[in-house]
Amino acid sequence: MTAMGRITRSAGGEVITLAMQGLAQAMFGQKNEIVIVAEGSSEPDGDEPLSLHLDPDHPERSTVVVRPVDEPPSAP
C-alpha cells in the first residue's frame, strides 16, 4: 500500500475526508443527481422475458414486466 493509501484509509484521513465533504455541501449545496440508464430495443419482441415501458415525462410510471422463461409470451 502506498503512503497516500495509508493516510486516506486511516481514521484521521476519514475524518478529514468527511469534513471536506461537509464543507463542500455547505458552500455549494447538495448534489441531488439521479441517473437512470436504460437500454432497450426499438422494436417489440414477444419472445423476450422482459417487457420494458419507459415514460420519459413521468419516470415513476415506467414499468418492467419479467416473465418466467417457461411462460409463453402474451400478445400485446
Image (cartoon, rainbow, N blue to C red):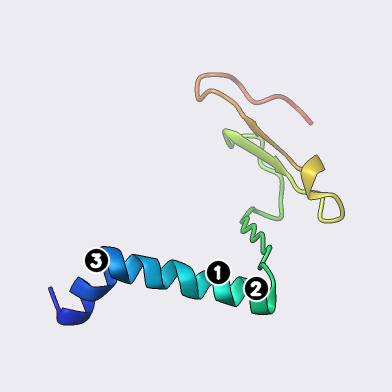
The image position of residue 1, as x and y in percent, is 12, 73
Q: Nearer the viewer, residue 7 or 35?
A: 7
Q: Is residue 59 left or right of residue 52?
A: right
Measure the C-alpha gap from mark 3 to mark 2. 24 Å
Secondary element type, mark 1: helix
Amino acid type for the residue under numbered disc 2: Ala
Instruction: Write down the residue under mark 1.
Output: 22
Q: Residue at x 81, y 41 (%)?
A: 61
Amino acid type for the residue under numbered disc 3: Ser
The first of marks 3 and 2 along the sequence is 3
Q: Residue at x 63, y 55 (%)?
A: 38
Q: Which mark is residue 10?
A: 3
Instruction: Write down the residue under mark 2.
Output: 26
User: As displayed, is residue 38 above or below residue 12?
Assistant: above
Measure the C-alpha gap from mark 1 to mark 2. 6 Å
**Among all residues in the image, which is located at the extreme top?**
71
